[in-house]
Each structure stands twice: as structure tokens, then as C-alpha cells.
Amino acid sequence: MSDLFSGPAESAAGLTVYGADAVDKSAPASTRDALVTAGVPGKLAAKDPGLWGPDAEAEAKIRLGWVDTHERSRELLPQLAELKAELGDLDHVVLAGMGGSSLAPEVITRTLGRPLTVLDTTDPGQVRAALGDRLERTVVVVASKSGSTVETDSHRRAYWQAFLDAGMTEAEAGRHFVIVTDPGSPLEQTAAEMGAFTVLADPNVGGRYSALTAFGLVPSALAGVEVAELLDQADAFAASLGADRDNPALALGAALGAAATLARDKVALVSDGTGIDGLGDWAEQLIAESTGKAGVGILPVVVESPQSPGAKGPDVLTVSYGGALNAGDVPGGGTDPDVAVNGPLGAQFLAWEYATAVAGVVLGIDPFNQPNVTESKENTNKILASGLPAETPSFTEGAIEVYAPAGAPGDLAGVLRWLLDGLGDDGYLAVMAYLDRFADADAARLRPVLAAAGRPVTFGWGPRFLHSTGQYHKGGPQVGSYLQITGAVADDLQVPGKPYSFGELQAAQAAGDRQALAGRDRPVLRLHLTDRSAGVAQLLDAAGELRA
């Protein structure tokens, strides 16, 4: 057993955090002691909105419901049982949602081995594939707090039209939808007009903190998960949140905050392989969108395995997660983390939410707002109204059109090297792929290849990441460089009732985000794949040359 697992650890209700004490003690003064002295644990457990300063108080007052939402969520259990029975043989569950509305159910169902189709893309190929899969047995869970999310509204329209085209009446089509939204949202009214089932969520919980609300529980339950167990796990763990000691979530939050103040402001999130699948993607949104603002923040980097490039680094805090309850069950994997978080999934959700809120106290930011998220959305809407801006590639190499900043080299391998060389000692590279995350899945292999150069590299599927790390890109420390990958659309798909297609929406989202990033004078390199399969293979080959 490594020193990490034999040293001090904190446990509560089966969840244990290892190594946090050592990280905290590496600071000149204990961050945790300062938090305890200020009464933060008790105040946060009591939902004190003043913890993050006067400017954040109004937002915090309506966003702290996550602390005990697991208690109120028990009221959903009879409704979910009735809904599942009412749906009968509609056993193909499709979740149309973005960010906080999709990431938690994806973790829950992957971890517990239940099938769920998550539709959080505007790529026409990926949308078309979902529409063609067991349509007559499909129930679509449309999940949006505001009810105005463009991607989710587009998915709802596409499925509605597909059901009608399959010969269903409007009344029959409506019974294939379950709407999850906040009370009084425009989507609640739309659901009534559709004749859809409606489940209202806790309005006092923000999207990225909503794992244990209707947003996390409804699609998971319909997919066959016994969600009461998640609530039981969270309920048992919640008793520790007000404590000064034996409070694993406080230990984790203090470690995250202490590391960030010591210039270890990138957090590598690594699964230890002991039973929780995909939590890193959920925690990525939680941490990035909560802390990346006002020029500060913690950058989460989801790493494939403990041995993958990017799991370690001078400005990286490595945190592993898993379900193993005993230190002896946690594999070292050849690269011991700095901190390990192990325990049941329901407790994990609550622990990470609490820890992120605590890190917000340490960093002096409001962990519940997202001031920069709307910027790319507004750019997208303008582009959809006026058309895509005309652009000429800097050069073309094989199946890749390269749109590079002035002064960049004129070959693919050279421009990739140029982008990496410009990162400096505190920078990071964000790879943003506006592609089909299933048909073009090999594109994700680019992350570890580029990370082998020695700097943190994140990977996000567009527009999914816009609801996650997109906030950090604009609001966090301005040390990022950006590699955007777009692809030719061979078979587009119209968004019913709208003057644009999914392909046009996807292109507008990519262009809108480029504008937002370029406006901050950060390097943005766009690679457009004229042939997706050939382009991905060519790009991986070129990136591999950087290690030669």
C-alpha cells in the first residue's frame, strides 16, 4: 500500500478521502483550519448564502437547495414508479439534455449498468442515428431547467416530427415524451400543449448541482436504476457536512482550494477502476463552471487512466475516484494520486458539490453563477441570423483545412507544435471537437497524444463542453490555447420549425465560440476535416510525429 492510503484519511458513511491533509499542510497556513475558524462547515450545512460575499448572496439564496435536495427528492419516488408503469413497453430511454441535465444521469446509468441514450449534440449524424434507433419503443426525456436550451429544443422538435412521420397522432406522440423542467418555465407550458408527462424539478438547485434532483433521477429511474439507493447514500453522508472533523467533503474542498492557491490550479480527474464510471465528466462541469470566473479558477482535466499523459505535472493536483471502500482495494496503478475519493455514488455527488462550494469560499468567487456562458450563445444566435462568416483556410493538407493565426507554420505537424510550444509554464490546451462523439470517437485519442508534450490538455465534444468547461475558457485564467476541430456534414438534418439545420446550428456554435475566444487574444487554431474518418487518422498521425 502506498503512503497515500496508509496516511491520515477522513471517512463518513462509507466515503473516504485520502491524502487531502497532506495537500492542505503543504500550504504556509492550513486552509482547512481557516475554514473551520470561520465556521464554514456549519454555515454551509445550514445553507448560509453569505459565505461567498455580498455580491454572491442573492444568487446563493436561490441555489443552495442541493445541500438537502436528496430529502425532497424522495417525494418523486412514487411518481417515478407510476410513470415507469404508465410507459409500459417504451423501454428505449433517450435523454435530450445538456450539461447538468445529462452528465449526472450518464454517470449513474453507466456505473450501474443500465442502458441510456444521451443526446447532447447538434451533430446531424449523431442526431440522425438516435432518431433511427427503436423509435416505436422510445421515450424521450427532455430535460432543461430554463426550457430555452437551443440544443434540447431542437432535439424535442426532431423527435416530435419523427413520431408524426412514423404515423402517430399528436396525442400518441405526446405519450412518448417526459419533460423535466423547473416550475413555471416555458417548457412546462410546451409539455402541456404536447400532452407529455411532466416532472417538475427543485427550482432552488442550479443545473450542475442537480444530480440528486429530478434531472438526475428521472432518466436514471426510467432506465431501470433503483434511485432510492442513491438518495439513501446521500442521506447517510449528509450528516457529516456540518462537522469540523470527520468531514471528508470539507477535506476535499480544502485540498482543492489550497492547491489552487499554491499554483496547482489544474486537477487531473482519474478513475481508479473500482466501480464508478464517468464521474470525471460530471465533476469537470461542476468544478470548471463553478470556479472559472473573474480570472481565477480550477481547471479539471479528465484523464483516461492513472498511466495516461497529463495525470501528473508541476501545476497539477491528481485526484482519483472510485467505489472501493477500503484502501487495500484501491489499485495504485503505477501513478499514485495526490488525493483519492472512494465511496458510493450518491455520497460522491454530494461530497463533490460541497467540496466545490468550499473551494469557492477559498478562491473568493461565486460558485453558483456562470457569467460568461451566454457569450457564445449570443454569438451563435447572431450568426444564425446573418450567416456564417466567410473564411479562407491558411493551407490545406490532405483531408484537413487549417485555419491558423497569423505567423503560424504552414504544415500540420508544425502548427500543432507551434500551438503547444506557446503554452508556457502555466498554460493549457483545450481540444474542442464539433463532431459525432460515437462515429468520430477516435478524435478523443488526440488528448493523451498532445498531453505527452508535457502540458495539461483537455478534450471536449462540442457543443457539450460549452455547458461545462466553456465557462472556464472565457472566465478563468487567460492562459489557454484552443484547438477547434470541425467536420464536413455529408447528410444534414433540418431542425423542424426552424430556418436552420442541425449542421448549420453546429457550425454556428463553433464559429460563435471561436469569436468569443479570439476576442480575448488567445490562440485559436481551427482544423476542418473535409473527410472525417481520413482527417481524424491524419490528425492523430501528425500529433504522433511531435513525440518522434
Image (cartoon, rainbow, N blue to C red):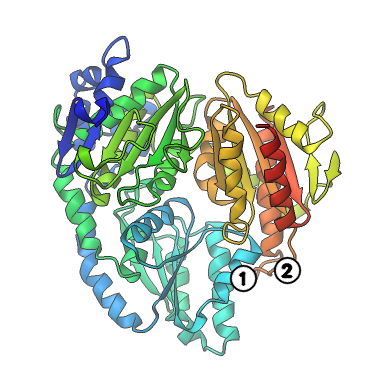
Query: Can you tell which quarter of the image residue 311 is in?
Result: top left
Expressed as whole percent of the image width and height from the top left, the position of residue 169 reads: 52, 89
Provide the residue designation for mark 2.
491
Residue beneath the point at 53% across and 76% down: 133
Secondary structure at badge 2 equals loop
The numbered mark, 2 or 1, whose residue comes first in the sequence reads 1
Expressed as whole percent of the image width and height from the top left, the position of residue 146 reads: 46, 55
Residue beneath the point at 73% across and 61% down: 489
Query: Can you tell which quarter of the image residue 57 is in?
Result: top left
Q: Are marks 2 and 1 in contact (CB under 8 Å)?
A: yes
Name the quadrant of the N terminus. Answer: top left
Residue beneath the point at 41% across and 44% down: 280
Three-letter code for the amino acid on which mark 2 is drawn: Asp
Expressed as whole percent of the image width and height from the top left, the position of residue 162 reads: 58, 79
Q: Which mark is residue 128?
A: 1
Expressed as whole percent of the image width and height from the top left, the position of residue 479 reads: 59, 25
Three-letter code for the amino acid on which mark 1 is drawn: Arg
Residue beneath the point at 45% across and 82% down: 137
Vertical placement of residue 496 versus 427, above or below: below
Q: Nearer the viewer, residue 485 or 319?
A: 319
Name the quadrant of the C terminus. Answer: top right
Query: Can you tell which quarter of the image residue 392 is in?
Result: top right
Q: Nearer the viewer, residue 420 or 483?
A: 420
Whether residue 135 is visible to the viewer of this picture, yes or no, is yes
C-alpha separation, residue under disc 2 versus residue under disc 1:
9 Å
- Side (left or right) of 352 relative to 391: left
| Circle 1 crowding by C-alpha within 10 Å: few under 14, some 14–19, many from 20 | some
Q: Which mark is residue 139?
A: none
- Side (left or right) of 69 relative to 95: left
- Side (left or right) of 317 relative to 435: left
Whether residue 46 is visible to the viewer of this picture, yes or no, is no
Q: Nearer the viewer, residue 327 or 294?
A: 327
